[in-house]
Structures are given as structure tokens and as C-alpha cells.
Image: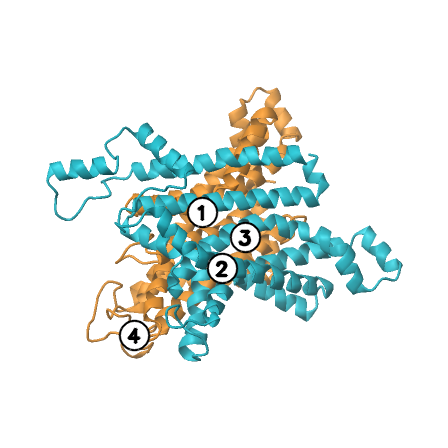
Amino acid sequence: MLRFTLLRFLWAIPTLLLVIVLAFLMVHAAPGGPFDAERALPPAIEANIAAAYHLDEPLPQQFKRYLTGLLRGDFGPSYRYRDYTVAELIGNAIPVSLKLGVLAMALAVLVGIAAGTLAALRQNSVLDRLTMALAMSGISIPVFVVAPLLVLFFAVQMQWLPASWSGSSSGWRFLLPVVALALPQVAYVARLTRASMIEVLGSDFIRTARAQGLRTRTIIRHHAMKPAMLPVLSYMGPAIAAILTGSVVVEEIFGIPGVGQFFVRGALNRDYTLVLGIVIFYATLVITLNFIVDVLYGFLDPRIRHR
Amino acid sequence: MSVGTLVTRLSTEMRRSRSIRLSGGILVAIAIIAIIGPFISPHSYLTTDFDGTFVRPTVNSFHLFGTDDLGRDLFVRTLMGVQVTLLVAIIASIVSLVIGVAYGAVAGYVGGRIDAVMMRAVDALYALPFIFLVILLMVVFERNFLLIFVAIGAINWLDMARIVRGQTISLKEREFVDAAKLIGVPAWKIIFRHITPNLLGVVIVYVTLTIPQAILVESFLSFLGLGIQEPQTSLGALVNGGVSQMERASWLLLIPAVLLATILLCFNFLGDGLRDLFDPRQQSK
């Protein structure tokens, strides 16, 4: 197990490094500098700005400086938000984004597994078909379509819930963003759970348990659930990435001051250091969580770890 | 299986499956309307009309979907959006198809250590949060049209490569490959002349499933304002515009949103249906 964990960890590092190098090179290959303003600055001032941000150094040296900064948690200064460092901007935005993401993930897993299990137990019934049709819609309809439609119906037409983040301070303001963010993942988890549950329920050890006269509920809870959850667990990596991507949209639509909103603002303002910093932050998050999921998987499924 | 028999089999099987018929039919209808519609409508997607902003959908004056905040006709703009969205998705899928098939076929055919290394690289790339790199790419390089195709195509080839590799491994044991080897056909020619044509069935299925993914990425980028730029438009850009006007003119959001959802749903149903036909073991998950 230790060897397996170590091996996975060793794979995670070059992956992350690759992202950093790619992202860094992309930003530095950008045509035009970050300070190209509408009116041209005197060359002396331009040189001064370049020197202040170390843009006059050769590329490898800039990269070395950036990388050592990263190790200390220093993402450099923001080009547009002049008084802030990128680390400060990200740090301030993390709590609300984290809350949003964790709630959405929890909702996706709980509702998805419940719906998928129910559908599997009543395979080919009306309930099953309905759940799967809904799941297909959930997968097909992107977050940036679901979120505005939810706002239009529940906030603008019905006025049951606040439309924007700043318009309310109660916990209810979390409801629509979390639901919008979770829906596609609910759908994926439900489909995966249904498929693997049907497979597990058809296997020999479940037939044995049935033959012993155990109740369906006991069989599900004590025998079928764990093996059926393996595909769902392996989907958690992509799910995390999807929730992160979705949060960018959801935060923009609802006006939530999280990491995603800074990302979009930074992207539209061409705030290179901010965007670069957030890309690296997201990549670290995705790769770390993927690593944890992998190790968990190896823990639950001996077949993987001994490969 | 030759291309001819494949097509006959496809068409008979497709007529039998209701979900394939229905979703395929809807897609073809949408595509035809999107191509013909702009010629029939008296309006252009560009013309602004400041006396006729926020016109509700009406048959009078032929504003079937109403007009937007600049008085531009939403019907024509939506059809333009569908055209752009479909175009980007199809070209991006072709890009991912070419990369995926070439990579997968080579890895599968060559086998051994090279195959192992190539597939480990695919595993590593799976872990990359590509979408963020694509966003970065769009930020850095002035959002040009060509780049969108390449960037989206470059994300989506991984699945294709895996599936093609698996198929190639089983194909290369077949007699016709042995025969080709025996008469001295070089390896690259065996891969591209003898193996690739036989991958057609699987490839068609997975392209149908790649298209909605490409649409998703394109509309996501356009929604963020990083994809297609004004006055050009795509469904994602229209949804984005609709969001800012939704309290005043809900149709500006509803029409493109519903259309985008319908297109994605149809492609997914189509892909799922085709997969069940070709590959009964890989049942929809």
C-alpha cells in the first residue's frame, strides 16, 4: 500500500510541474506586454516597470524566480489589482468558493447515489426510466444554462429566493448556486450508481445473500453498497474538476466573490499573473484531490493496488 | 467490414431504433433551419434598430424570436449561433479524431514498451485540468477562431486514443494484417491503410459523443466572453447576453438556452444509441 501511494505521489509531481511550465510559457509567449496601455509610455518608464516586475530578466531566470516564489506560497503581484498580491486575492476568495464546492459535492453524491440505487432496484420501471431521462438531461444541459434558468424561475418570476449574492445575507442565497453547480454531477453519479448497482446485484454473492433470506435493505447496505461505489469513487476526480469549472460560471452568474469570479475578471482584464496564479491553484487542487481519490480507491479495491 | 456494408448496416439499424431516429431527425431539422433560415428572414444578424429594441417574439415584421437590446433580430442571430456552434464542434471533433486515431492506432499497433509509455502519458494528461489551460490560452492569444478549434480538439482526443488503441490491439491479430505483413507492407501503411478503415464503426460512435463535449467547451468559453467575439455569435455567447437581460426580456435567455440544451441532449442520445448498437458490451454508463 505504501509503495502504491508513493508511486502515485511521484506521478502527481511531474504532472503539476508540467502544468506550471505550460501555463508559464503560455503567458510569456503572449503578444504584447501586460502593461501595454492605450497611450504609449516613455521608454524609460516602461523599462522601469519591466524591471520592477522582473520582466527584463531572461526567461529561465524569471521561471526560477516564479517557481521558488510558488514554493513559499507567493504567486507574485497582481497586474491589475495594484495593491494586492495574487496570493492575497486567492486567499480572500477561497472560503466562499470552498463552501460552495463542498456543499455541491455533498449534494451530488448523496442525491446521486440515492437516485441511482432506487433506479437500479426498480430496473426498467417507470421510476427508473424517468430518473434516467432526467439524468440524461442533467448531463447534457450545461451549468451556464441551468443556473440562469433557475434564477429566472425561482428568483425573477416566483421571487422565492434571492437572485444575487449581494441582495441577501441569509444562508438561502447558497441554495440556487449549489443546486445549479450540483445538478450535472447528480446526474452523472446517479447513472454510474445505477449501472454498477445493477451489475453488483446480479452477482453470485448477492444471490447467496438473497438465498439466505436477508432483506433487500440489509443486502444493499451491507453487501452491495461498497463494491457498487467503486466506479462512483473513481468518478470523483473528474467530478471535482467539473465542479471547479462550474464554479467559475456559477460565481459569475450569481455575483459570488469567489476564486472563480476573480478568474473570469482576470481573464477579461488580461491580468496575466492573476490568471496564471489561479490556473496553478486549480491545477494543484485537482491533482491533489485526484491523488487522494486514487489512494482511497487503492485502499478499497485490492485489485488496483497489487497491479 | 467494408465501408459499403457498414453504411447499409448503419442505416438499417438506425431505422430500427426510435431514440436514434428521433434525436437524429431533430438535429438534421435544426441544422437545415439554421442554414436556410438566415436567407429567408428579411433581417440580418448585424443590423441594429434602436426604435425596435426588446420586441417580443412576434410574427408581425417577422421577428419570430423577438429582438435584443440593440434591436437585432434574435431569430437570425440564434440561427447564426447554431451555425457557429455546430461548425466549431464538428471541426474540433475532427481535430480530436485525427490526433486520437493516429495516436491510439500507433500505440496499439507498435505495442510493447512504446505503447506503455504512450498510454502512461495519456493517463498523466487525463489528470490535467485542461479547461483552465484553454482559458489561459484564450486570454493570452487574442481569442482567434482557429485557436478555438485546435484548443478544443486538443482536449478531447484522449478518450478516442484509448478506444482506438484497444480496437487496434485486437485488429492486429487478424489474418489480413498478417497477410499484409507477409507481402512486406511497411508498418505505417498497415496502420493507415488496413487498420484505420476498420476502426470506422467505433470512431463514428465516439465522434458523436465528442461533438457535444466540444459544443460544451465552445459555449462555455463564449459564455465567459473568451470564445466567439461580437458581432459574430454562438449559442454560448447568446445565453450570456440573455443572462444580463433576463429580468427585462426573458426570451433572450430562454430561446438560445433551450436550443443549446436540445442540441446537446440530441447528440448525447444519438451517441448513446449508436454505442449500444455497435458495442453492446460498453453499455451506457
From the viewer's perspective, is A14 left or right of B88?
A: right
Going by the picture, which residue comes out furthest to the right?
A: A212
Viewport quadrant of the C terminus of chain B: bottom right
Q: Residue at x 34, y 52 (%)?
A: B227
Disc on res. A239: 3
Type of amino acid at the residue the image marks with label 4: Phe
Q: Position of residue A22 (x, y in %)?
A: 39, 36
Q: Considering only order in the chain, which callout, 1 or 3, is on the residue closer to the N terminus?
A: 3
Chain identifier matching the cyan colour in the rendered picture: A
Tags 4 and 2 on a common chain: no
Question: Badge 3 sits on which subunit?
Answer: A
Q: Residues within 10 Å of mark 1 (few under 14, many from 20)?
A: some
How far apart are the two marked residues, 3 and 1, measured between alpha carbons? 14 Å
Type of amino acid at the residue the image marks with label 3: Ala
Viewport quadrant of the N terminus of chain B: top right
Are the residues flagged by discs 3 and 4 in contact, CB closer than 8 Å? no
Q: Position of residue B217 (x, y in %)?
A: 43, 52
Are the residues flagged by discs 1 and 2 in contact, CB closer than 8 Å? no
